[in-house]
Image (cartoon, rainbow, N blue to C red):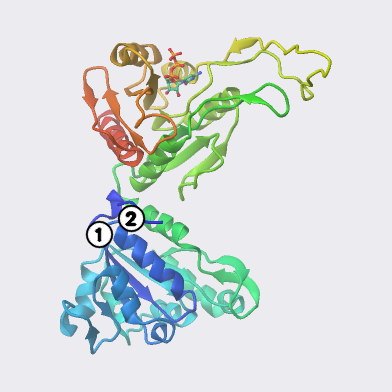
């Protein structure tokens, strides 16, 4: 699957230091995904790495020269050797050693500089990410443990390897995570100085499920995609994110804490618990307004000898944003609240009324009758309202809408509590 551009990574210089482990095959995919996301990826290979894959493989996916020797570079357009050994590290936004072998970790821990990668690591002033991959016994060896601790004490970010089966047939901890997880870690590190750094942001996603009996429920068409895009955008902006979600089939944004709920009542409890000291709440969830008054203990059975169907009596659920409004009036938290409005008629009039009734700082209104916006699609067409302004956004992906909302939340927070 091709990778969408990622605003956070656009034109960022990422140096991948590739060392000699069989896990290197996964890094060709990573280099490709980073490039598709908009990053400028420079690959440095150690001699050992070149026993597993060629420089040409990386050059083909990044479209940039690959550096594999202090004394020689492959491909046109490469930095001259006398500049490359410092230039690559100096201008980089991120240096990631992936896969990182025990040997390279040992060299980095001791400040050795006998190849292009280790020289670059000494010259670099950007965040360093290490993603070890090696046989389990090697990873757990006290020498490797100490080297990793030394690097972390100096500020390196460790991507812990996964447990599993190695190419050798042994089982243990030392497998390089898959590309999606590696991308998630990169976003987390690159985002840590963003507009929401140090802020706690609570986000709700998905439609709630209101039980009828142990097998049936009432729900709605919300897919949760806008809420998940918001959670990822908030992680990209450096926030500590709590994602309160009913969704089961979307990839979880790495770095966001997940709180699984099902009904409106469970969501209310989780929201009040999570927001009592939060900076912001973004209520993207489609919360049921009605639930069955009683929930049958056993599955409701049909009768073979009659066409009779049960009558469902519904009752109101609590309005979560109104409860949060009460909490905020008492405690001041969350500092900022954002609501959504799903409307099928009189969009602006209804949305403005909702903004006031719910006491939110910002309301994201969308017309759910449009084919290309709202439920179950990847795009959204929204109007963002605050007490004084209304800003229509063009049809955009839910990711871009999320980025816009997150940056507006950052601005409101900066004004309220710098
Ligand atoms: N919301 C909520 N609690 C509910 C229902 C909705 O907190 N019980 C939140 C939603 O998450 C959303 C906002 O309120 O952020 C507006 O939701 P929406 O469904 O558009 O409006 P309703 O409150 O249901 O109002 P109406 O029935 O008038 O459309």
Could you say which is closer to the camera, residue 314 or residue 255? Answer: 314
Residue 198 can be seen in this image: no
Residue at image point 53% right, 80% down: 143
Q: Position of residue 33 (x, y in %)?
A: 36, 61
Q: In terms of secondary structure, where does tag 1 sit?
A: loop
Position of 41 with respect to 50 (left or right) is left
Q: Position of residue 254 (x, y in %)?
A: 46, 50
Indicate whether 384 appears above or below 306. below
Q: In terms of secondary structure, where does tag 2 sit?
A: helix
Residue at image point 39% right, 65% down: 30
Q: Earlier in the sequence, mark 2 or mark 1?
A: 1
Q: Quadrant of the N terminus?
A: bottom left
The residue identified by callout 1 is 12
Q: Position of residue 79 (x, y in %)?
A: 17, 78
Cβ atoms under marks 2 and 1 closer than 8 Å: yes
Could you say which is closer to the camera, residue 236 or residue 326? Answer: 236
The residue identified by callout 2 is 190
Q: Quadrant of the C terminus?
A: top left
Image region (quadrant) for ligand 1: top left
Which mark is in front, 2 or 1?
Answer: 1
Count of number-bearing discs:
2
Q: CA distance from mark 2 to mark 1?
A: 9 Å
Which image quarter: residue 354?
top left
Which image quarter: residue 365?
top left
Dot 1 surroundings within 10 Å: few (below 14), some, or many (20 or more)?
many
């Amino acid at each position: 699957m091709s990778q969408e551009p990622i605003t956070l990574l656009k034109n960022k210089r990422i140096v991948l230091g590739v060392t000699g482990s069989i896990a290197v095959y996964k890094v060709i995919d990573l280099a490709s995904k980073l490039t598709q996301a908009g990053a400028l990826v420079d690959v440095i290979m150690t001699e050992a790495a070149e026993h597993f894959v060629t420089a040409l493989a990386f050059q083909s996916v990044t479209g940039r020269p690959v550096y594999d020797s202090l004394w020689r570079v492959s491909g046109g357009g490469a930095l001259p050797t006398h500049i490359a050994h410092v230039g690559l590290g100096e201008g980089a936004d991120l240096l990631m050693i992936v896969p990182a072998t025990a040997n390279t970790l040992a060299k980095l821990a001791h400040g050795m500089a006998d190849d292009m990668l280790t020289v670059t690591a000494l010259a670099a002033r950007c965040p360093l990410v290490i993603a070890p991959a090696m046989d389990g016994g090697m990873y757990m060896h006290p020498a490797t443990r100490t080297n990793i601790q030394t690097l972390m004490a100096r500020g390196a970010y460790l991507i812990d390897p996964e447990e599993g089966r190695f190419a050798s047939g042994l089982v243990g901890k030392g497998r390089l995570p898959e590309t999606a997880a590696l991308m998630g870690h990169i976003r987390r590190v690159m985002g840590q100085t963003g507009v929401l750094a140090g802020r706690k942001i609570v986000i709700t996603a998905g439609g709630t499920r209101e039980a009828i009996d142990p097998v049936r429920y009432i729900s709605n068409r919300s897919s949760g995609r806008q809420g998940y895009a918001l959670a990822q955008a908030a992680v990209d902006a450096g926030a500590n994110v709590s994602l309160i979600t009913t969704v089961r089939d979307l990839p979880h944004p790495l770095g966001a804490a997940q709180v699984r709920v099902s009904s409106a009542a469970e969501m209310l409890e989780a929201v009040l618990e999570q927001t009592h000291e939060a900076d912001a709440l973004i209520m993207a969830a489609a919360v049921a307004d009605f639930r069955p008054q009683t929930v049958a203990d056993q599955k409701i059975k049909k009768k073979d000898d009659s066409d009779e169907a049960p009558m469902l009596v519904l009752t109101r659920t609590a309005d979560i944003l109104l409860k949060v409004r009460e909490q905020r009036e008492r405690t001041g938290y969350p500092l900022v609240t954002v609501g959504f409005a799903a409307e099928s008629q009189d969009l602006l009039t209804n949305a403005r009324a909702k903004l006031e009734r719910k006491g939110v700082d910002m309301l994201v209104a969308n017309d759910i009758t449009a084919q290309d916006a709202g439920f179950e699609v990847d795009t959204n067409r929204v109007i963002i309202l605050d007490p004084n302004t209304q800003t229509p956004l063009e049809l955009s992906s839910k990711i871009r809408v999320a980025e816009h909302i997150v940056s507006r939340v950052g601005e409101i927070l900066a004004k309220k509590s710098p």
